[in-house]
């Protein structure tokens, strides 16, 4: 499929509130049928300070800290591909505690990755 330039234009409706539209998501993927839910992660090492400095989302709350061991952060988010990608980018420094659906997805993706590295 090839793209071509047209004279068509698009105007954002005055009623559109981008901040509200993206309030419960990470990134640009929005599924309006999804409801936000509690996401809780356990974070280790320097990643803790990183999240304290640059929160993953504005709903971030640090709900538990075990000095020099880990911290747990909680969010109110819709599950989407960008969230999973951000969590996977933290590698071994993060563990998804809930929801179980997200924990299982991250586990599956890590197992798929390990499979690729176990053969040459």
Image (cartoon, rainbow, N blue to C red):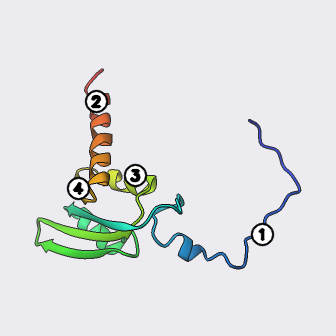
Q: What whole-number distance in Å separates the C-alpha atoms at marks 2 and 4?
A: 20 Å
What secondary structure is found at the residue carrying circle 3? Answer: helix
- Comparing 39 with 110, the one in front is 39
Q: Of marks 3 and 2, which one's residue comes earlier in the chain?
A: 3
Give the class, few, some or many, for how many residues have Cα within 10 Å of label 4's Cα (few <14, many ≥20): some
Q: What whole-number distance in Å separates the C-alpha atoms at marks 1 and 4?
A: 43 Å
What secondary structure is found at the residue carrying circle 1? Answer: loop
Q: Is residue 75 left or right of residue 46?
A: right
Q: Residue furthest top?
A: 120
Check disc 1 and report the residue beneath it: 11
Q: What whole-number distance in Å separates the C-alpha atoms at marks 1 and 2?
A: 47 Å
What secondary structure is found at the residue carrying circle 2? Answer: helix
For image coordinates 33% across by 50% down, the residue present is 88
Q: Of marks 3 and 1, which one's residue comes earlier in the chain?
A: 1
| Residue 47 drawn at (x, y percent) | 26, 63
For image coordinates 89% across by 56% down, the residue present is 7
Check disc 4 and report the residue beneath it: 93
- Comparing 81 with 49, the one in front is 81
Q: What whole-number distance in Å separates the C-alpha atoms at marks 4 and 3?
A: 14 Å
Q: What whole-number distance in Å separates the C-alpha atoms at marks 3 and 1?
A: 31 Å
Give the class, few, some or many, for how many residues have Cα within 10 Å of label 1's Cα (few <14, many ≥20): few
């Amino acid at each position: 499929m090839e793209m071509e330039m047209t004279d068509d234009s698009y105007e954002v409706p005055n009623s559109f509130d981008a901040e509200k539209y993206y309030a419960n998501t990470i990134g640009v993927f929005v599924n309006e049928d999804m409801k936000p839910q509690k996401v809780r992660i356990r974070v280790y090492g320097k990643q803790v300070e990183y999240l304290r400095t640059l929160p993953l989302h504005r709903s971030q709350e640090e709900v538990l800290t075990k000095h020099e061991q880990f911290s747990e952060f909680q969010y109110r988010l819709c599950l989407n591909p960008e969230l999973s990608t951000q969590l996977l980018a933290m590698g071994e420094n993060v563990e998804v505690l809930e929801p179980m659906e997200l924990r299982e997805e991250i586990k599956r993706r890590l197992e798929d990755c390990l499979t690729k590295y176990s053969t040459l």
